[in-house]
C-alpha cells in the first residue's frame, strides 16, 4: 500500500444565527466571509486535537465566494492565520468544487506531494443583500496580494441559444430534468408532487436536528408540495420550498492530512476519517446536447467509480449526503446507488441546500464536515458525499470511513464526451414532440413563460417557448410526449400543441 493515506483530521462549521464559535458586537462585520473563514479554519484545527496542524498546511483552497470578491482570498486568509502554504487555490463556479478540491488534494497527499491541506469557504449573501438595502456594506475587498492559483472550468452553464429560450438559471433548468424524470417513471402529476413532498420532508427532519442549519424546522410533505402565497410555484413543478436557498450566512472548513502527519502532530485516532476513494466527471457541457433529460449517466459513473475504488457497493454505505439543490439532483443520485424513497439511511446529513442552507459554491464543505462528525460517531461505517456543478454538468463523489482502507487511495476522472450525443437545431420548423418543459411563475404565483424542449421528426432537438394562453393548461396534465408544431420567428422557436 501507499505510504500516505489521506484523512480528514479536523472540521468546523459556523452559523451566526446559532450559538456558534464566537460572538461579535457588530453582526455585519462578524459575517464578512474572510472573518468567518478565519473562525472556522482555527476551529477545525482545534477540532483535530492538534492546533499545530495549521503549520503543516501546504495548500489552502477556497471555493469561489459569491458575496465578496476579494483580490486574493486564500492569500488574505493565510496571512490572518499566520501561515504561508505553497499553494493558495481559488476555484471557478460550481457546487462540485469543495468535493473536487478534496478529491484533488487527497490525491496530492497520497502521492506524498503535500503534508496537509485545508478547504475553507464562507458566504454572507444574507448580510450582503441586507446591507445593500440599507447602505451599510463596508467590507474592504482589497485583501490578499498577487493572484491565487485558479482551479476549475470557467465556462458558464448554458449557451446563448439555451439562454435565448429562457433556460439560463438553475431555477429554470432543473425543472426540465424533473419533468422528464417524472414522465420516464410514468407517475401522474399528483403522484409526482406527493413524492417530491415526501422526499423533501424527510430532509427537514435532519435540518431540524442540525445546529448549523439555516432553517432548522421540520415541515410536512403536504406543506412542501402545496402551492400557497408563501410557497408559490417558482418553475413548475417546484414550489419555493423545493429550491435551494442561497441567502444565508454560513462557513465551513475541512483539514486534510496524511495519516502519518496527523499522528505525528498528535491527532487522536478516533478523530481520523479516511478518504477511501474519490471520483470526478464532466458531461457534455451544453444541456441542449445531452443524451437525455431523464437521467444522468455521468453522475452514475462518478458515484459508482468512487464505490468501486473503495471496494464496496452502495449497500455497504450507511450515510449519504447527495447534492440537493433541487429534488431531481437527489433523485438521480438515488437511482445511481439503487436507493428507493423512504430508505432509512436517508439522503442527507445536513438537511440539504433548501433547509441547512445553500451557500453558493460552498455547501459541500458543510456536508463533508457533517459527514465527518457523523462517521466519528458511527465508527467503522461508510459514508458518501456528492457534489454537483451547473446542470448535471460537473460531478464529484467520495467514500469515507473511520475504518482504515485495505487498498490504496483511488481516484478516477471521467472527461467530457468528445462528441455530443444529440444535435441541437437553432431554427426549428415542422412537426415535433415535447421531450420536457417547465412553466415560470411570477411573484404573484401566476404563470408567465414556458420553456419547451422537443424533438423534430428527424430527431434533432430544439428549445422553444409556448403561447401564454396554454401555460395554465400544461401544468394540469402531462405535457411530455405532446405532439404539435414548432416554428421559428425572429430567431425564437415557438411550440404549439396540436
Image: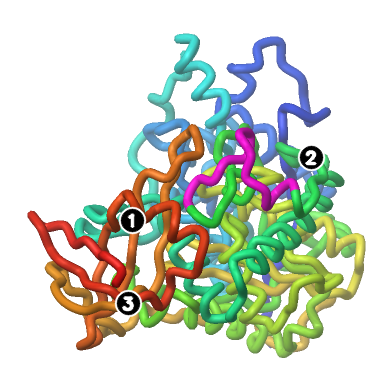
Percent of width and height locating residue 299: 53, 76
The residue labelled by disc 2 is: 216
Helix or strand or loop: what does disc 2 sit on? loop
Q: Is residue 77 left or right of residue 18?
A: left
Looking at the picture, tell me which residue is in the foreground, 365 or 243: 243
Percent of width and height locating residue 85: 52, 48
Mark in front: 3 vs 1: 3
Helix or strand or loop: what does disc 1 sit on? loop
Q: Is residue 144 left or right of residue 120?
A: left
**Disc 3 to disc 2, C-alpha distance:** 45 Å
Mark in front: 2 vs 1: 1
**Disc 2 to disc 1, C-alpha distance:** 32 Å
For image coordinates 53% across by 84% down, the residue present is: 301
The residue labelled by disc 3 is: 483
Looking at the picture, tell me which residue is in the foreground, 191 or 170: 191
The residue labelled by disc 1 is: 167
Q: Is residue 42 left or right of residue 423?
A: right
Amino acid at each position: 500500500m501507499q505510504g500516505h493515506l489521506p484523512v480528514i483530521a479536523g472540521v468546523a462549521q459556523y452559523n451566526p444565527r446559532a450559538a456558534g464559535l464566537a460572538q461579535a458586537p457588530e453582526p455585519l462585520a462578524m459575517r464578512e466571509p474572510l472573518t468567518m473563514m478565519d473562525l472556522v479554519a482555527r476551529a477545525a484545527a482545534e477540532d483535530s486535537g492538534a492546533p499545530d496542524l495549521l503549520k503543516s498546511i501546504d495548500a489552502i483552497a477556497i471555493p469561489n465566494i459569491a458575496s465578496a470578491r476579494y483580490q486574493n482570498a486564500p492569500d488574505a486568509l493565510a496571512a490572518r492565520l499566520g501561515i504561508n502554504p505553497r499553494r493558495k487555490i481559488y476555484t471557478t463556479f460550481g457546487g462540485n468544487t469543495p468535493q473536487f478540491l478534496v478529491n484533488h488534494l487527497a490525491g496530492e497527499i497520497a502521492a506524498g506531494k503535500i503534508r496537509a491541506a485545508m478547504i475553507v469557504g464562507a458566504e454572507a449573501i444574507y448580510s450582503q443583500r441586507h446591507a445593500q438595502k440599507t447602505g451599510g456594506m463596508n467590507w474592504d475587498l482589497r485583501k490578499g496580494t498577487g493572484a491565487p492559483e485558479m482551479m476549475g472550468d470557467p465556462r458558464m452553464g448554458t449557451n446563448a441559444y439555451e439562454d435565448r429560450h429562457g433556460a439560463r438559471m438553475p431555477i429554470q433548468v432543473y425543472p426540465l430534468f424533473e419533468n422528464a424524470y417524472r414522465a420516464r417513471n410514468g407517475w401522474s402529476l399528483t403522484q409526482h408532487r406527493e413524492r417530491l413532498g415526501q422526499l423533501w420532508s424527510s430532509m427537514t427532519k435532519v435540518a431540524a436536528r442540525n445546529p448549523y442549519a439555516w432553517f432548522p424546522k421540520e415541515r410536512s410533505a403536504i406543506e412542501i408540495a402545496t402551492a400557497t402565497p408563501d410557497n408559490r410555484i417558482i418553475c413548475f413543478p417546484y414550489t419555493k420550498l423545493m429550491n435551494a436557498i442561497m441567502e444565508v450566512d454560513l462557513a465551513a472548513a475541512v483539514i486534510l492530512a496524511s495519516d502519518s502527519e496527523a499522528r505525528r502532530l498528535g491527532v487522536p485516532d478516533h478523530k481520523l476519517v479516511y478518504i477511501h476513494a474519490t471520483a470526478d466527471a464532466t458531461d457534455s457541457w451544453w444541456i441542449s446536447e445531452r443524451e437525455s433529460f431523464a437521467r444522468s449517466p455521468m453522475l452514475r459513473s462518478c458515484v459508482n467509480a468512487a464505490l468501486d475504488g473503495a471496494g464496496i457497493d452502495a449497500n455497504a454505505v450507511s450515510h449519504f449526503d447527495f447534492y440537493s439543490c433541487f429534488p431531481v439532483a437527489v433523485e438521480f443520485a438515488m437511482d445511481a446507488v439503487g436507493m428507493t424513497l423512504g430508505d432509512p439511511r436517508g439522503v442527507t446529513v445536513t438537511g440539504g441546500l433548501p433547509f441547512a442552507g445553500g451557500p453558493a459554491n460552498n455547501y459541500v464543505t458543510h456536508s463533508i464536515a457533517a459527514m465527518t462528525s457523523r462517521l466519528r460517531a458511527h465508527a467503522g461505517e461508510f459514508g458518501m458525499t456528492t457534489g454537483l456543478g451547473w446542470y448535471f454538468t460537473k460531478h464529484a463523489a467520495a467514500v469515507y470511513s473511520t475504518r482504515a482502507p485495505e487498498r490504496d487511495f483511488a481516484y478516477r476522472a471521467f472527461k467530457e464526451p468528445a462528441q455530443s450525443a444529440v444535435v441541437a437545431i437553432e431554427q426549428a420548423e415542422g412537426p415535433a414532440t415535447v421531450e420536457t418543459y417547465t412553466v415560470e411563475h411570477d411573484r404573484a404565483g401566476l404563470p408567465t413563460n414556458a420553456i419547451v424542449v422537443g424533438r423534430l421528426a428527424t430527431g434533432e432537438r430544439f428549445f422553444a417557448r409556448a403561447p401564454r394562453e396554454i401555460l395554465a393548461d400544461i401544468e394540469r396534465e402531462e405535457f411530455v410526449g405532446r405532439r404539435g408544431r414548432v416554428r421559428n420567428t425572429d430567431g425564437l422557436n415557438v411550440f404549439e400543441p396540436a
